[in-house]
């Protein structure tokens, strides 16, 4: 509380003390105070004020903010009043200059009432002024032809109560919350801070029409991710603007009219529960180790570096051919407090065996995450030799260095496109899996494993950045086929599972991440448009372009012969190792190298090495997700 308000309270209390004593004397003597008590009052009023102010300061009554005064402050006021009255009566009795005892009793009652009224009157007046201001602004909005958002709350729990309370505090509330829905029927026909709880969530359309709703706020922080996704999907079918409760902790960083709210993200519609990482176990493997991340500037590689940096490695080595991404990541990690002495950024290619040998000899990494790869399916269809050189031979170079330098763990980042591949990129990644499985059999020093998962939202070349660019350009959004589906997860959760799988590695496994339910790309496009506040096919069109070369309608995560083993993490499964030997694989790679040098048909060469790779005349195929496959 500033000095101005403290001064007002001090002056007010001086007046109230004298007023309370005057009222007590008038009451005791029927409005005719004897002259002896008038003289006594004149001699004692300064003592009265000093005792009262001193006690009030002791109870810190001049430090509380009047607009936030509560029953706790009421107790302090009562205690201070009783104590100061008792001390004043004790003073009079000690010096034999006391008023009648009934005067002290009346004085105490009057003073307590006046003190409470003086404190709470500020809050009352402030509320009246606030309501007047809101009414004025609402009238002004009507005159100007604008209005607040008529809002429906989904959920009527603690989060919803916070939103309602915050909206009522605002001088000009952006959201006019007119009703709430909740699946708990015991809450129906009751109210939440004045907002009626009118029905269940499945009655959404009915109440949107009845209350003329233009904004929906979803406030279900304790519901599971699947339930929230279902509710958001239901809400997205309406034409209302959609917001979601972001939690108390986010209020500090959130901007906008109501700080606890944020826009709905595509990730919210996936219905994926938060992945719980066994941080202690993962940290035990990373702490005090030298970790090398190839492709460290890419989408997965950079997130690996971020999460690894929080696990206290002795050194983190970022190895990437593209210097801009590596440079940006270096600056980001340093800004976030990662020690410069522990960070090394190296520019180089995994194709360059000599450069890799130099890195491994100089820094002696204990753990290698191999994320470097060409991953863009259509581009690799046009440049199959580059996919083979970078993905296959780059992986072989890195794996051989890891084996020769006795690295503890080597983790290959793979893809669901390696299963029954219909494109060059997926076939090269299947070969990468075979490399790490076969080379694992040649050494007891290094555990070679692969981690396979589907698409990640927001990664370079993924559909969400594409949709964003297309939306910024006014559309249309392009989808290759109305029935195409993909498995999705966010980049951070994919990396958490990679780190967890690393802690399980014993050598030779292909860890398969649980990607949840597949998502139709068309549904993703529709929701993306709606979440941007636009209407599909009206504001932004969706155009079907046809499957691209090498593209499947369905992606698969596990080959039939691999089976499915469990780990202690229900989100991670294990495929059984391939029977191929390192000698057999080396012969395959010699054959591919010769095919590149001789200008042979590389697709046919890949098919000869990986029989599960199916080539169609036009370069793309639509396999059924459950069709049989052989391990190449």
Image: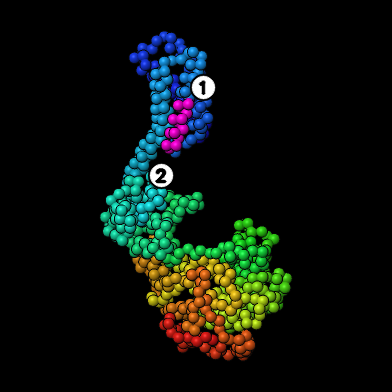
**In the rendered structure, are the residues bearing label 1 and label 2 in contact, judged by CB atoms less than 8 Å apart?**
no
Whether residue 71 can be seen here: yes
Taking the spot 65% from the left edge, 82% from the top edge, the residue there is 442
Q: Reply yes or no: does residue 12 show up in magenta.
A: no
The image's colouring method is rainbow
Count of all numbered marks drawn on residues in the image? 2
Q: Residue at x 45, y 55 (%)?
A: 246
Crowding at dot 1, Cα within 10 Å, few <14 / some 14-19 / many 20+, comes out as some
**Residue 170: mark:** 2
Q: Quadrant of residue 601?
A: bottom right
Q: Which residues are magenta?
A: 70-83
Whether 459 is drawn above or below 155: the answer is below
Can residue 422 be seen from the camera position used here? no
Task: Residue 229: give x, y in percent of width and height.
Answer: 40, 64
Q: Residue 503 placed where, x, y %?
A: 58, 69
* Closer to us: 310 or 27: 27
Considering the numbered disc 2 on the image, is that residue within a helix, a strand or a loop? Answer: loop
Q: Work out whether residue 535 or residue 420 is closer to the camera in this orientation and state it.
A: 420
- Near-viewer residue (566 or 259): 566
Residue holding disc 1:
50
**Above-or-below relation of 336 to 121:** below
């Amino acid at each position: 509380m500033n000095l101005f308000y403290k001064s007002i309270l001090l002056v007010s209390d001086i007046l109230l003390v004298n007023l309370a004593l005057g009222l007590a004397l008038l009451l005791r003597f029927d409005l005719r105070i004897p002259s002896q008590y008038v003289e006594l009052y004149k001699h004692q009023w300064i003592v009265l004020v000093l005792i009262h102010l001193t006690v009030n300061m002791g109870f810190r009554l001049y430090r509380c903010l009047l607009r936030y005064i509560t029953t706790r402050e009421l107790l302090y006021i009562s205690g201070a009043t009783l104590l100061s009255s008792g001390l004043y009566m004790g003073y009079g009795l000690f010096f034999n200059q006391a008023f009648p005892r009934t005067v002290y009793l009346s004085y105490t009652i009057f003073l307590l009432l006046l003190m409470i009224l003086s404190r709470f009157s500020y809050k009352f007046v402030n509320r009246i002024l606030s309501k007047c201001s809101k009414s004025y602004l609402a009238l002004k909005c009507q005159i100007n032809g604008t209005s607040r958002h008529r809002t429906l709350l989904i959920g009527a729990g603690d989060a919803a109560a916070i939103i309602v309370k915050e909206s009522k505090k605002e001088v000009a509330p952006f959201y006019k919350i007119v009703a709430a829905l909740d699946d708990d029927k015991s809450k129906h026909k009751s109210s939440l801070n004045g907002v009626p709880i009118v029905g269940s969530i499945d009655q959404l359309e009915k109440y949107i029409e009845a209350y003329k709703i233009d904004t929906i706020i979803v406030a279900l922080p304790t519901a599971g991710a699947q339930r929230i996704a279902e509710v958001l999907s239901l809400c997205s079918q309406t034409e209302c603007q959609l917001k979601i409760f972001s939690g108390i902790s986010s209020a500090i960083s959130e901007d906008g009219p109501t700080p606890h709210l944020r826009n709905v993200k595509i990730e919210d519609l996936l219905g994926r529960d938060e992945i719980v990482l066994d941080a202690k176990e993962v940290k035990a493997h990373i702490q005090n180790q030298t970790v090398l991340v190839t492709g460290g500037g890419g989408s997965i590689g950079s997130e690996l570096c971020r999460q690894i940096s929080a696990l206290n490695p002795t050194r983190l080595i970022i190895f990437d051919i593209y210097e801009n991404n590596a440079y940006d990541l270096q600056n980001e990690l340093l800004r976030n407090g990662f020690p410069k002495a522990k960070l090394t950024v190296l520019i180089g290619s995994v194709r360059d065996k000599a450069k890799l040998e130099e890195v491994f000899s100089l820094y002696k990494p204990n753990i290698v995450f191999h994320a470097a790869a060409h991953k863009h399916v259509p581009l690799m269809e046009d440049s199959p030799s580059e996919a083979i050189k970078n993905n296959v031979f780059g992986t072989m170079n890195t794996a051989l260095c890891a084996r020769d330098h006795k690295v503890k763990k080597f983790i290959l980042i793979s893809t669901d496109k390696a299963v029954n591949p219909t494109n060059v990129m997926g076939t090269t990644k299947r070969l990468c899996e075979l490399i790490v499985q076969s080379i694992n059999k040649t050494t007891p020093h290094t555990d070679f494993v692969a981690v396979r998962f589907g698409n990640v939202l927001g990664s370079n070349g993924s559909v969400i950045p594409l949709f964003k660019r297309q939306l910024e350009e006014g559309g249309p959004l392009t989808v290759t086929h109305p029935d195409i589906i993909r498995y999705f997860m966010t980049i951070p959760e994919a990396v958490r599972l990679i780190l967890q799988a690393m802690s399980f590695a014993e050598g030779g496994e292909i860890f398969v991440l649980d990607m949840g339910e597949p998502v139709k790309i068309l549904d993703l496009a529709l929701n993306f448009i709606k979440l941007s506040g636009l209407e599909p096919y009206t504001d932004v069109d969706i155009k079907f372009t046809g499957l691209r070369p090498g593209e499947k309608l369905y992606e698969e995560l596990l080959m039939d012969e691999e089976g499915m083993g469990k780990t202690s993490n229900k989100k991670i499964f294990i495929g059984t190792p391939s029977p191929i030997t390192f000698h057999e694989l080396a012969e395959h790679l010699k054959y591919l190298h010769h095919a590149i040098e001789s200008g042979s048909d590389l697709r046919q060469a890949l098919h000869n090495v990986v029989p599960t790779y199916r080539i169609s005349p036009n370069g793309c195929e639509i396999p059924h997700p459950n069709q049989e496959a052989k391990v190449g």
